[in-house]
Image (tube, rainbow, N blue to C red):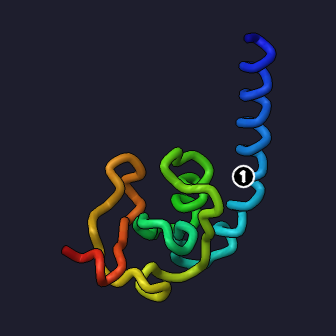
Amino acid sequence: MKFIIASLLLLFVLGMAETVQKSKACLSCTSTCVLMAPAGVNFPCYQGAPSDANFCYDTDPLLKPNTTYACGTCAQFGFPVYLQNDPIYKNMELWLTADKKN
């Protein structure tokens, strides 16, 4: 049992190290960074300052594997409808596609 727990912990740590390395790209954005779920996943777009987006990307357990980041706004990437700010990551805005408005 201890081996299984240790193995799972190691996988988690290695996964987090990979995530941290990937998320540093948000820090190269000059104004806004977005986090987008993979195509076909029904999930809002996150939008915020680069440092906030980087922190969210690294720590939000709800973000799906293969979430991508980009410099720009959610509207530029097909999410034109503002929903609300994330209840946990309060500086991150959540945006929806036009067909998810209602």
- Tell me: 68 left or right of 88: right
Quarter of the image containing the N terminus?
top right
5 or 53: nearer the eye?
5
Q: Nearer the viewer, residue 9 or 25?
A: 9
Residue lying at 79% horizontally and 26% vertically, measured from the top left: 7
Question: At 57% across and 69% down in the image, what residue appears?
Answer: 38
Q: Residue furthest top?
A: 1
Residue ID at (40%, 80%): 79
Which residue is painted at 37% across and 65% down in the image? 93
Relative to residue 64, is residue 44 drawn left or right? left
Counting other residues with Cα less than 10 Å from the Cα at mark 1, is it few (<14), some (14-19), or many (20 or more)? some
Whole-percent x, y for residue 80 in the image: 35, 84
Q: Residue furthest left?
A: 102
Q: Is there any visible trace of residue 35 in the rendered image?
A: no
| Callout 1: SS | helix
Residue 62 horizontal/vertical position (percent): 48, 49
Residue 39 picture location, percent across and down = 54, 74
Indicate the quadrant where residue 11 lies.
Answer: top right
Q: Amino acid at mark 1?
A: Val
Foreground residue, 26 or 42? Answer: 42
Compared to residue 84, the image places residue 17 above or below, namely above
Q: Quadrant of residue 14?
A: top right
> Residue reaching furthest bottom?
76
Q: Which residue is mark 1?
A: 20
In which quarter of the view is residue 51 placed? bottom right
Q: Is residue 48 above or below residue 11?
A: below
